[in-house]
Amino acid sequence: MTQEPKDGVTKYSFERRELAGSRDPAVDDLIRFRSELFVREAIGCDRRRYDACYGNVSARVGPWAAPTGRRAFLVSGTQTGEKRETSADDYVTVVRYDHDQNRVWAEGPVDPSSESLTHASIYDADLAVRAVVHGHERQTWLWLLAHGAPQVPKAVAYGTPEMAAAARTLVAESRQKPWRLPNVLAMAGHEDGVVAWGDSVADATRRFLAVYDAARIR
Ligand SMILES: [Zn+2]
């Protein structure tokens, strides 16, 4: 894919080196906890509502101490939303990313999710973050918006450098002053979009499910 500046917006693009699926143990966690989100339909495909598949998960790989822009992570590939079970072949390693260029460099068997840069910005915000999960779940989203959870403003569009910057700011802020259910944010302008993060895939998923459950208490 090439970069195509359009209306002053730099379109998301990526470069990918074809490589076999990763054998990093983080893949097993991604496979396992992604299915927790899939069975709750927070990851999946809804052609009617979004005309697309939605939701993605990621986990940092390699040393904790890495400069921003180079905090490598495994992320689910595009068009994997339909699968009930994923395998190592559904994940790709983002080795480098550039928010200004809205571009990622990846290695693996599938193309990186178009929301990879939102994940990257959360890793840039805090070295302690080792996993990010992003799902679309209407009840959870509405509940977060109604209860004053950290949120990316409505005007910020999906897949833009502005989305990445806003997510980064919210994550950094929440480190100083956590919301009552910590490590979650809602994307007001990205229908039903919810993001959670943590020090492991299990932790990030638990944070997501904490708000999923809270939204269902009557
Ligand atoms: Zn999304």
Image (cartoon, rainbow, N blue to C red):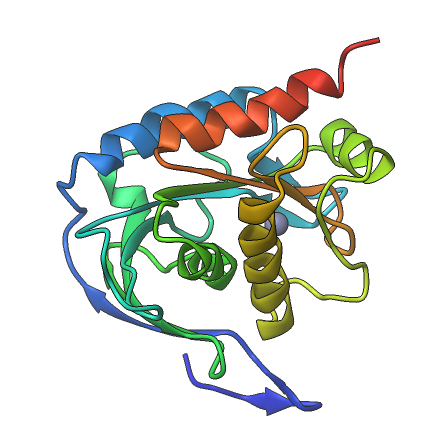
What residue sits 15% from the left and 59% below the top? 19
Image quadrant occupied by the C terminus: top right
Furthest-top residue in view? 218
What residue sits 66% from the left and 23% below the top? 212
Q: Is residue 187 left or right of residue 23?
A: right
Judging depth in this view, the residue of 160 and 67 nearest the camera is 67
Judging depth in this view, the residue of 108 and 202 nearest the camera is 202
What residue sits 61% from the left and 71% below the top? 160
Q: Is 178 located above or below residue 11 in the figure?
A: above
Furthest-front residue in view? 176
Residue 198 position, x and y percent, is 43, 37
Q: Is residue 86 visible?
A: no
Task: Name which quarter of the figure residue 213 lies in.
Answer: top right
Judging depth in this view, the residue of 53 and 217 nearest the camera is 217
Residue 40 position, x and y percent, is 59, 21
Q: Is 117 located above or below residue 179 in the figure?
A: below
Judging depth in this view, the residue of 189 and 145 nearest the camera is 145
Q: Is residue 207 left or right of residue 91?
A: right
Task: Name which quarter of the figure residue 42 lies in.
Answer: top right
